[in-house]
Amino acid sequence: MGKRANWVAMAAALGLVGLTGCAVGGGSEGGDGNSSGGDVTLSLLTFETPNLTASYWDDIIARTSAKVPGVKIKKLVAPSAEQRNEYARQLDSTGALPDIMVAIDPAGLAEGGKLAQFSKKELADWVSPTANSFNGKIYQLPTNSQTWQIYYRKAAFEKAGITTPPKKWDDLLAAVGKLKAAGIKPFVIGGGAPDGLGPRWTFSQLVADEVYAKDPKWLDKLVEGKTDFSDPLFVNAATKMKALAGKENVDNLSATYAQAQEAFLAGKGAMYPMGSWFPAAPDKAQQKQIGVFPMPTQDGSLVVPTYTGGGLSVGAKSPHVAKAKKWAIEFSKLNADGGARYDGLFVALKGYKPPSGLPPLYNTTLDLYNRAQSSGTVTPSFGNEGGVPALPSGFIPKVDAALNDLLNGRADVGKFVATLNKQFKELSK
Amino acid sequence: MTHPLRSRPGDVAAGGVPRSGRPEPTAAPSGRTGGPRRRRTWTWPSAGAFAVFVLPTLTVFTAMVLAPILWTLYIGMTDERATRPNTSFVGLDNYGFLLGDEEFRHSLWNTVVITVIVVLLTNLLGLAIALLLRRQGRLYSLLRGVYFTPVILSAVVVSVIGRAILADDGLLNSTLVSLGVKSPPGWLTDPSYAIYSVSGIMVWQLLGFAVVVYLAGLAGIPAELDEAASLDGAGPWQQFRAITWPMLAPALTINTVMLMISAFKVYDQIAVLTNGGPGTDGTATVAFEVIRTAFSEQRPGVASAMAGIMLVVVSIASVTTLKLLQRREVNL
């Protein structure tokens, strides 16, 4: 029986080893075998875009880690920029929410207690320390601001006989007509899976003028059930979207984000409605060929949708929250110049002065933002409102899908609005 | 003590010789009509043997399969949401909601369409290619490797290649345009084509598996049968119908069940090729909706109910198909 008992014990031990070997988690104390004694390994969730390449991340990670001794970073990359929020939540559901996450929408994770709160002291160096507030609590470093506008190819405008960028809505429609008459596709916006967020970046500019500029409390009303998407303001924005970016006006609605950017830079369309990070993409020659103007409004006034936040978050269950926060804050400060140069970020650090030699388009776009701030016509950006009140989790992908139908002619404005109402009601339950 | 693996009375090998090698003991009088009956005795295995041979497997199975299934079914009866502090038991509400939900029913329909296409087309093409590749020679060995390559690639890699071919400005449409087609179809962007495009990519990836299984089945058919049939004047079609096809019944069973399960749980290809689109009436399958509902919408309760429905559907379909095909094997 002694031998038998040994076998039983061995089998049980092997079973336990097998089971524990399946456990996953975030950071570990020197757990990966590569860390020197006393080091902690922290996982960092990033995502790659045409601007934010693998080498960009590797470089800034190395520089930050050099400043925060005792921390070793294990980089995780989300499947795509659009899927990063979903990916973070998948990791969370397996108990492996990364220790640090870049530009993850905190909604849901914050209320669920999954993210660590930043203190006033930790936020003291930033211009908008209360951006993305969840009832006064901040779960994401407000490191930068981003705006949305239209980039255009000067040569295409010249060829179509457009002398100055349009300011009013009717001017824009006229410009679209002229471009088509000259045999030029008016827009490149993308919209193809798995990175199909291009149409929303156009739509958010229309919502800014038609909805948020006219009713700054519109989202509050929507969340409180006092209005819905059949509100005439929102319907106006949807109607404009269909008129502007229907498939007949767009180069290729199935292009992914990266393909669309490549197509615009290759001269396949005249206008590219995009975020303020785009100026980092064109090379020196292309910088001179491309201009920027805000989305034309009904009366020609300046309205710029803006989002401030987009920084790093830290998992509340990380075994090393303090070190993770320290690393995240250091990263955000060290990344300021790189973020401005390589991702076109408007750095929101107090007293920050952008380095010299930034791309000309960066400065022109920043000028638009500064003018909008001076005139008080900065609005939230639809889908990137941040904090609470907020659109329910999972709603934005539904908007993207509904926009895809709208632009491809599979839905009219009525069906688009009805779809959003149904999805919003369901996801808000 | 009787060891469960040792031979027992009545366990007779071919030719009437007991496997134990010992003479078969005389059966005890049963007192019933109908002659002597062989007594079958069965005892519980000893605790030690159970612990060594069964317990580890049972523990792992319970921890990795049974418990998660039961937990999922339980969560499916709650209104759990990541953003809600309290979770309540809601019984079958989620199931009722899903059965009436147009979006979920659409994903169920998509799953069925993909499954039918994948099972039928992969079996058909797999058999045809296996028949062509059953010969010996370097070229045939090479071709067998070529057909099997997509099987060992990750679904994501295969889908990225598929996307490069099927995108609006991809390889296929570029070729069509160069041939004079003015408006080539949106293989992945037109809802009327997208589901078939996704199915096509899956067929491409799984084809190698079906070919290998059929080749193994073909290798097990004695050459004498074909020779005898040939001598009797049977043509190739008659040989195929009377010998090859019936003898491939086990291969058909394996392929059908494995392909069906692979198709039912398709997620990766959808995520890469269409991300559930194009648009709202796109290519989302049940597995895709489960992931999207659980993680993007943060509604684990509803997602678990979806997984529960999927479990029932897959189980019924798999068991029914297996039974039907196995019955066919016996009848042949």
Image: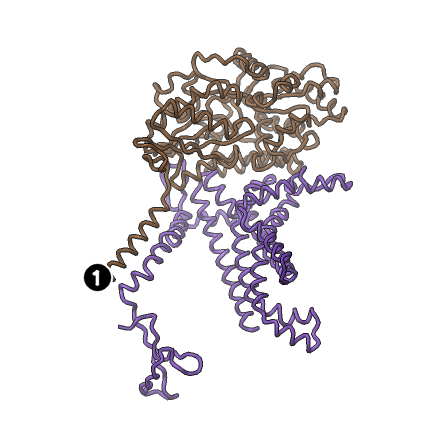
Chain colours: A brown, B purple
**Is residue B292 rendered to the left or right of residue A120?**
right
Figure quadrant of residue A116: top left
**Viewer-proximal residue among A291 and A406:** A291
What residue do we see at 55% from left, 51% from top? B151
**Viewer-proximal residue among A332 and B35:** A332
Residue A215 showing in the rendered view: no
Quadrant of the rendering where the N terminus of chain B is positioned: bottom left
Residue A42, relative to residue B229: is it above or below?
above
Figure quadrant of residue A170: top right
| Farthest front residue in view | B138
What residue do we see at 40% from left, 42% from top? A94
Q: Which residue is mark 1?
A: A2
Other residues around mark 1 within 10 Å, as few (<14) / some (14–19) / many (≥20)? few
**Is residue A253 rendered to the left or right of residue B92?**
right
What residue do we see at 44% from left, 37% from top? A89
User: The disc labelled 1 sits on which kind of residue?
Assistant: Gly
x%, y% of residue A219?
50, 26
User: The residue marked by circle 1 belongs to what chain?
Assistant: A
What residue do we see at 69% from left, 69% from top? B236
Secondary element under disc 1, as helix, strand or loop, is helix
Residue A401, relative to residue B73: is it above or below?
above
Residue A18, relative to residue A407: is it above or below?
below
x%, y% of residue B73?
41, 51
